[in-house]
Image (cartoon, rainbow, N blue to C red):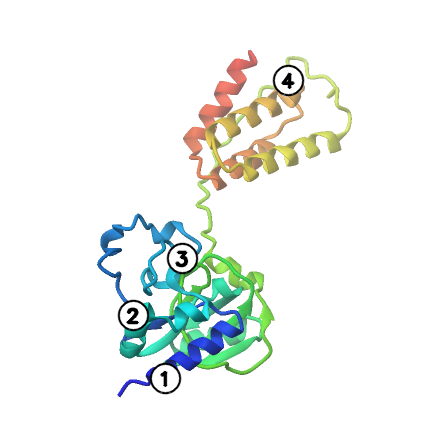
Amino acid sequence: MRNTTGHLRTALWLAGVGLPVLPLREGKEPFGNCPGCTRSACGDRPHMKAAGPCQCPAPCHAWAAATTDPDVITGPAWARAWRQAGAVAYHPGGGGLTVVDLDDAEAVAWARQTLPATTVVPTTRGEHWIYRGTMPSKNGVRPGADVKSTMSYVRWRGPGAGTMAVLPDAVRSLVVKEPTVQQTRPVIVAVPAGGGQCPHRSPAYLERGIAMAEQCITAATATIHKTVYRTFLTVLSAHGRCGCLTEAHTARLFTAAQGKGESVRHCEDAWTNARTALGM
């Protein structure tokens, strides 16, 4: 016999403390879409949303149906789901939380050695480590570990023990993909015939220029090719004719560009095109 009353009571309590809730079927799965929402007939695209995706009153759309509204939770549209529910889940990101879901003893041991202490909830096979703060969710961040926060749901297994800590960088970094940096080929910048003293006189001026160029490339969120080319053009126009640029400086620029997804070939082409545009 299902614990309908107990699940509903738990859901209302969680909603009361600010955690959006939803019923789960047996097996920890959310309820499927109702006929009006099947195959996104309602116009929903759950992966594009941060809240309830449509006006459907049923607990459709998995995490996106989670709510703190007691009228919805106890309403007729959710009544059938509660009668069939096997558990209660919550949307951690909607409540300002992040859960590190550890599936086995090895993952738990890693967390105890690596992550700051926080609220810990025992699960069937491992533990949930809960932090204050939100971030993108991602499964398989390391063996036996998932991160669940925004656009995700977690089965409620109790309040746990321990003081909840602020979401640390050690957890945030788990979902950051390390950029693939290809080996940079040497790029030679010709020194003007006869040499001559650099007109900038101060090495700090060059260092500041290179650092600003790296920052410009790293901060780019769109039109990466154009940003890289224009940055190379700016650097060469300021420092390319006096002979103060070294291979170490150009390697730093190439590395920054490769960190944004540019290939060595693209970097070389952008550098060559910038030199050509300046008549170098």
First in residue order: circle 1 vs circle 4: 1
First in residue order: circle 4 vs circle 2: 2
User: What element does badge 2 sit on?
Assistant: loop
Q: Which quarter of the rendered picture does the C terminus lie within?
A: top right
First in residue order: circle 2 vs circle 1: 1
Rounded to the nearest angstrom, the CA distance separating label 1 from label 4 is 79 Å
> In percent of the image, x 28 and y 67: which residue is there?
31
Residue tagged 3: 52
In the image, residue 2 above or below residue 90: below
Residue 89 appears in the rendering: yes
In screen coordinates, is 80 left or right of 213? left
| Three-letter residue code for mark 4 | Arg
Residue 216: percent from the left, percent from the top?
A: 59, 34
Looking at the picture, tell me which residue is in the foreground, 79 or 177.
Answer: 79
Outermost residue to the right: 201
> In percent of the image, x 48 and y 72: which residue is there?
15
Residue tagged 2: 29
Residue tagged 1: 5
Quarter of the image for residue 3 reads bottom left
Residue 136: percent from the left, percent from the top?
A: 46, 57
Residue 95: percent from the left, percent from the top?
A: 51, 66
| Three-letter residue code for mark 3 | Gly
Please state which of the two labelled residues, at mark 2 or mark 3, is closer to the viewer. Answer: 3
